[in-house]
Amino acid sequence: MQKLVQGIHRFHADIFRANHELFARLARGQDPQALFVGCSDSRVIPDLITQADPGDLFVLRNAGNLLPPHGAAPESGEAATIEYAVNSLRIRDVIVCGHTRCGAMQALLDPELTTRLPRMRRWLGHAEATRAILFDRYRDLDPEALWKAAVEENVLVQLENLRTHPAVAAGLARGELKLHGWVYKLDTGQVFAFDPRQGQFMALNEPQGITNPAPSANGARASAHS
């Protein structure tokens, strides 16, 4: 805890004061570029990964970067955040970002891990379609490859869930909203974005503008159902 308190002091002394005009402007209102839906995992820091400035990202994080479909959890914070981001903040881009070695996806594959976590088990019900796809398409993969496939497929499933929300459906119909599926690779720092034309996740290697396909085990690739 002491480290966090010291960090607050350094932030105020070294960063806040040096960027007083920026923070003064943000105090009057926000105009974020994107809604970033990510996992609560402490190793995944959206602002750090994207090198975003304060005010750039409207962030929604939970275990497994899950988005209950419309009506499944009507009073959920996820539904309220999506509605506010699209209808009030007029956000034009929504990113759903999973990450390798995700504990929620590991628990999805091995329900015994949630034996003493009943709320977590129920929460993972919003990824039940992910589990069904995995055991239908990838049952022959070794555990590590299956875990990786779970992360990728779950991003696509959550994008489908996202499309069921009225604010999102309307934004897509107007051509004012774009959805993006990303996977952050913990051990290399790379980000892979799903390319519907290729039917797979491709590395974002800007500024070179080069995209490379994510390596897949046994030729397994994420499906193009997003």
Image (tube, rainbow, N blue to C red):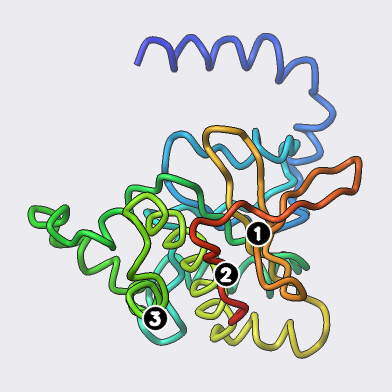
Q: Quadrant for residue 55, please give it.
A: top right
| Disc 3 target residue | 74
The nearer-to-camera label among 1 and 3 is: 1
Tell me where residue 175 appears, x and y as whole percent.
83, 83
For image coordinates 42% across by 11% down, the residue present is 3
Label 1 packing within 10 angstroms: few (<14), some (14-19), many (20+): many
For image coordinates 61% across by 42% down, the residue present is 46
Which residue is nearer to you in this view: 35 or 117? Answer: 117
Q: Quadrant for residue 118, please give it.
A: bottom left
Which residue is nearer to you in this view: 16 or 194? Answer: 194
The quarter of the picture where the N terminus appears is top left
View extreme (right): residue = 208
Q: Tell me the element at label 1.
A: strand
Tell me where residue 51 appears, x and y as whole percent.
73, 35
Q: Are marks 1 and 2 in contact (CB under 8 Å)?
A: yes
Q: Which mark is residue 110?
A: none
Q: Tell me the element at label 3.
A: loop
Q: Is residue 31 left or right of residue 88?
A: right
Amino acid at pointer 3:
Pro
Amino acid at pointer 2:
Ile
Q: Tell me the element at label 2.
A: helix
Q: Earlier in the sequence, mark 1 or mark 3?
A: 1
Q: Earlier in the sequence, mark 1 or mark 2?
A: 1
Amino acid at pointer 1:
Leu
Label 3 packing within 10 angstroms: few (<14), some (14-19), many (20+): few
For image coordinates 42% across by 77% down, the residue present is 137
Q: Is residue 40 above or below residue 171?
A: above
Q: Is residue 225 left or right of residue 142?
A: right
Q: Earlier in the sequence, mark 3 or mark 2?
A: 3
| Disc 1 target residue | 35
| Disc 2 target residue | 82
